Image (spheres, rainbow, N blue to C red):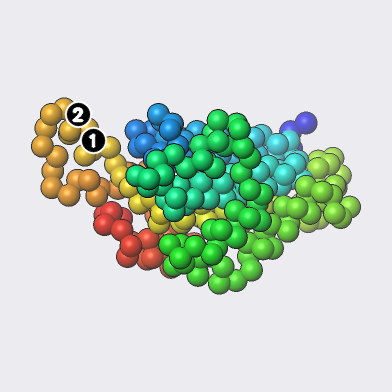
Amino acid sequence: MMVTDKQYKEHSIFTELRQYTDFYKDLSQSIFSFCSMGTGAIANIDTYVYSSMQGTLESMQAVLEMGRINDAYALLRKFYDSAIINVYSNLYLEDHFSIENFIVEQIHNWIQSKEQLPDYRVMSSYIRNSDKLKPINDLLYADDRYKQLRNRCNDHTHYNFFKHLMLNDNEVYLKNRIQSLDILARDTKNIFILNLAYMFFLKYHYMASTDYRDYLECNMEPPQDSQYWVATFVQEIFDKVISLERPDIVAVIKANSAMQLT
């Protein structure tokens, strides 16, 4: 059954989820030609990670349209895991790949379904203790928002309180339903920002437009510094989401990259 309450149906989370899914679709396609060094994979593994994350957010939208806020939180927890896996796998590859270690076994074996990645706590700790990511870590964890967010995801997933179960019943009047949707929207945005903050800091070339490559493929001389041009869809997500919410993170990314992000 679809929710008919006007305030619920017109909530900003539905527009925001479409914005995030469109972004991940564009990013997945844009980075396909970048090789994932250290994996033995022909294509960029992040292409498929971002496509999967797009699908998770689309699933969130579908269950929310049916009023299943509790189920949406279970999917949000999955989205959070995907974001951490995305950062961890890239960081681990960068830390361990070399001419002497051309194939990084842990990530290669994960891709080949021969080995599981470490659990969430281990991956999260590895990321937070990284010297490379310290400028971003210092900003993301200046408060406890992500700890509280993770706790909310776990509470909903495991039905730690009866109120979480009730948020899956769209036929019962709950005075806090819209407030719960507000919190879910904020949590989703915070995970989205975390994922982009880490990845664009770690792999700034993911921001690049295709212009430079397009010129080369046409046997034409690329315009000067065109390798540093930022893709339109990336600039738009900064303008509409990240810069508005976390200008401090944007400043750090710009200071540590030659990309022409405005």
Disc 2 to disc 1: CB gap under 8 Å = yes
Q: Nearer the viewer, residue 35 or 200?
A: 35
Which residue matches tag 1? Answer: 213
Amino acid type of disc 2? Glu
Tag shown at residue 18: none
- Residue at image point 84% right, 49% down: 159
Farthest residue to the bottom: give it. 142
Give residue 206's quadrant in the image. Answer: top left
- Residue at image point 21% right, 39% down: 212
Amino acid type of disc 1? Arg
In this rendering, the count of numbered labels is 2
| Secondary element type, mark 2 | helix
Q: Quadrant of the N terminus?
A: top right
Q: Position of residue 234 (x, y in %)?
A: 38, 47
Specify few, some or many for label 2: CA neighbours under 10 Å numbering under 14, 14-19, or 20 or more: few
Compute the Cα span from label 2 to label 1: 6 Å
Which residue matches tag 2? Answer: 217
Q: Nearer the viewer, residue 62 or 108?
A: 108
Q: Reply above or below: 194 against 64.
A: below
Q: Which of 201 and 54 is in front in this view?
A: 201
Judge whether residue 29 can be spotted in this image: no
